[in-house]
Image: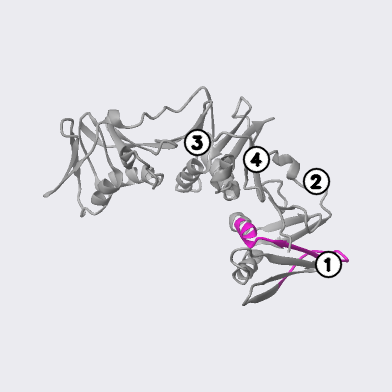
């Protein structure tokens, strides 16, 4: 293999797959490597940890076809530390399985492995596929991703439920103590489905979409198979196994008969909840929200600290209403929704509370209160 390209072009391309690199490679040293393979006037770089794979195409000048797998971290560390250079010449030797980089008077060689030793990466499945605006999907993912569980003992909650039914695509995340839902009406999908997509691949897809311009018209191509899902944006693909298990029947958790409904400014509530969280117990902390006519009082305390603050609210009840939450759950919602008015609905201090954006049906956030 022989190619020539610029440092900037090569670094930018490999960084696309590098972000998904796992620190857990187990007993397979080959998983520290990435695959570099030529095609006509381009190279494909591939990384996998056996759970997820990322493929990206980089335009280069191909002088001789070939392929090799090489340690990703060492190769990138060297390339990034090269000086300003107009061109890199990269070649590999099929006999020694070494890759060599020449830049001016600088020469660097690194031992790798042949392509046939690298895990085979499946192609994006096109049997059951659809396209959606990338920015819209990215916004949906970001709005619910934080609610998914990080605990490995309930692995089927370590991802988002993707469900298409009745012309509506739903994304749902829960860790058993909170629930986030967002939906999108679309006629771009022809077949109903229900799958659990792992956090890791969604984080990478979300990160990529965030790098697009705010007026981007890029489409996200989604391909589904029995045990895998694939995403393609422009010249980049993300392929992942699906999670096995039965996702909870979340519809039953959504409150339908809330007796109290109040609206507050999310930015103001975020600032005061941050202060309250600092003064709560780090491990089992809670923040108490007391609604009085026309105001919201926020309290927290720990062994050495006490906190109280007040915000205006449109609560008009004759009796005070008091409820306590894990502040992290409230902060996650507020950090996600931004500068909007948020509507909170309550039935009782020991029953799930529902948060929505004022004037919008979606997204919906459900949080279990704490018993203090």
1 and 3 marks in contact (CB < 8 Å)? no
Question: Which of labels 3 and 2 is toward the front?
Answer: 2
Q: Are marks 4 and 3 in contact (CB under 8 Å)?
A: no
Q: Position of residue 105 (x, y in %)?
A: 11, 49
Q: Residue furthest left?
A: 105
Label 2, residues with CA under 10 Å away: few <14, some 14-19, many ≥20: few
Where 194 falls versus 304 (above or below)? Answer: above
State the CA–CA distance, disc 4 to disc 2. Answer: 18 Å
Sort mark 4 into few (<14), some (14-19) or many (20+) by Cα contacts within 10 Å. some
Q: Position of residue 48 (x, y in %)?
A: 38, 37
Mark identifier at residue 219? 3
The stretch in magenta equals: 310-332
238 or 41: nearer the viewer: 238
Q: Secondary structure at mark 2?
A: loop
Q: Which residue is mark 2?
A: 256
Q: Earlier in the sequence, mark 1 or mark 4?
A: 4
The residue at which mark 1 appears reads as 320
- Helix, strand or loop at mark 1: loop
Mark 4 lies on residue: 183
Answer with mark 2 or mark 1, whichever residue precedes in sequence: 2
Callout 1 environment at 10 Å: few (<14), some (14 to 19), or many (20+)? few
Disc nearest the viewer among 1 and 3: 1
């Amino acid at each position: 293999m022989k190619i020539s390209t610029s440092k900037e072009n090569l670094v930018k391309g490999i960084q696309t797959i590098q972000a998904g690199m796992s620190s857990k490679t187990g007993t397979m040293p080959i998983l520290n490597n990435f695959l570099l393979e030529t095609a006509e006037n381009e190279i494909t770089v591939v990384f996998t940890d056996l759970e997820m794979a990322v493929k990206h195409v980089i335009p280069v000048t191909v002088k001789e076809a070939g392929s090799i797998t090489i340690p990703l971290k060492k190769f990138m560390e060297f390339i990034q530390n090269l000086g300003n250079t107009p061109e890199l010449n990269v070649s590999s030797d099929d006999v020694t399985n070494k890759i060599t980089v020449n830049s001016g008077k600088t020469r660097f060689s690194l031992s790798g492995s042949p392509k046939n030793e690298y895990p085979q990466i499946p192609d994006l499945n096109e049997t059951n596929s659809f396209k959606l605006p990338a920015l819209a999907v990215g916004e949906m993912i970001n709005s619910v991703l934080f609610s998914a569980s990080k605990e490995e003992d309930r692995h089927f909650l370590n991802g988002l439920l993707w469900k298409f039914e009745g012309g509506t695509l739903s994304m749902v995340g829960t860790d058993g103590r909170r629930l986030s839902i967002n939906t999108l009406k679309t006629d771009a999908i022809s077949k109903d489905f229900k799958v659990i997509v792992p956090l890791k691949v969604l984080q990478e897809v979300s990160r990529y979409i965030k790098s697009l311009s705010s007026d981007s018209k890029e489409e996200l191509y989604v391909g589904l198979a029995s045990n895998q899902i694939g995403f393609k944006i422009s010249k980049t693909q993300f392929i992942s196994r699906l999670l096995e298990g039965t996702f909870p029947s979340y519809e039953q958790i959504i409150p339908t008969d809330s007796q109290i409904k109040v609206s507050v400014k999310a930015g103001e509530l975020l600032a005061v909840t941050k202060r309250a969280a600092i003064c709560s117990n780090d491990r089992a902390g809670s923040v108490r929200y007391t609604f009085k006519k026309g105001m919201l009082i926020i309290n927290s305390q720990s062994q050495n600290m006490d906190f109280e603050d007040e915000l205006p609210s449109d609560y008009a009840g004759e009796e005070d209403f008091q409820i306590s939450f894990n502040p992290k759950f409230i902060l996650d919602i507020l950090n996600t929704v931004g500068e909007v008015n948020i509507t909170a609905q309550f039935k009782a201090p020991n029953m799930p509370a529902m948060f929505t954006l004022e004037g919008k049906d979606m997204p919906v956030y459900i949080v279990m209160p704490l018993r203090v």
